[in-house]
Image: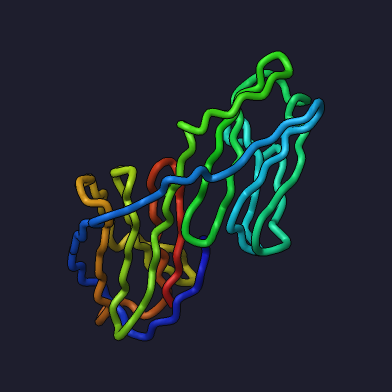
Amino acid sequence: MKNTIKNTKKGILMVTMFATLLSFANDGSLFNITNDAKRTYLTLESVKQGNLLSVKDINGIILYKEYIQKTGTYTKGFDLTALPDGEYVFELDKDLEINTIPFKVDSNVVVFNKENEKTIYKPVVRVKNGLVYVTKLNLNETPLKISIYFQNESGSELMYKEIITETTSKTISKIFKLEGLKKGSYKMIFNSEGRQFVEYIN
């Protein structure tokens, strides 16, 4: 997630806010699987053009990837039995979240466990009236690390770092006020659930 956000005011003054998500419903599965003699057919609902679908092994190595070409419902057949025995994952990278669908190959038999489906929510960053608003849905109640770097031609300098370990709230919200510090660009790095997300402020 690399987006450029324009802002003219500089400096960092942090104000912390936490909000509790009162209700959330996610009863449906992320996917539907059908099989024939040779192929596993994966159906994904509500995809958007530009979403990235990939297959990774247990070490995170990408074995297959494609960008979704059409908004709506995606269906495609895969010969997963050709993979060596082991654990793998389908990963759908969307605008605001990443859906992971794990499966296992054992002696040419492919098994999906819907109980192990997972959704990782990306932080959302927006700038308004000199304030940088950061919000992340935190249904999995996991820590979030935030690092802010000042960048110029000579390199980058760490300006602020925090690890949010308060995980009882379903939503993490923070506000950064930009004024009075060095003139230039800033990079915000977010680490959570084994993933890294980057935003730029110019």
Residue 138 picture location, percent across and down = 32, 50
Q: Is residue 66 left or right of residue 119?
A: right
Give the number of callouts. Answer: 0
Residue nearest the viewer, comparing 144 with 49: 49
Residue in the image at 56% along x and 52% along y? 93
Q: Residue at x 27, y 57 (%)?
A: 172
Q: Position of residue 89 (x, y in %)?
A: 59, 35
Q: Is residue 58 above or below residue 42?
A: above
| Residue in the image at 71% along x and 14% along y | 107
Quadrant into which the C terminus falls: bottom left
Using residue 60 as the reference point, say whether residue 109 is left or right of it. right
State the residue at coordinates (53%, 41%): 100
The residue sitting at the right extreme is 38
Q: Position of residue 18 (x, y in %)?
A: 19, 59
Which of the 4 image quadrants contains residue 88? Answer: top right
Q: Does residue 27 lie above or below 111 as drawn?
A: below
**Percent from the top left, x then y, of residue 54?**
65, 44
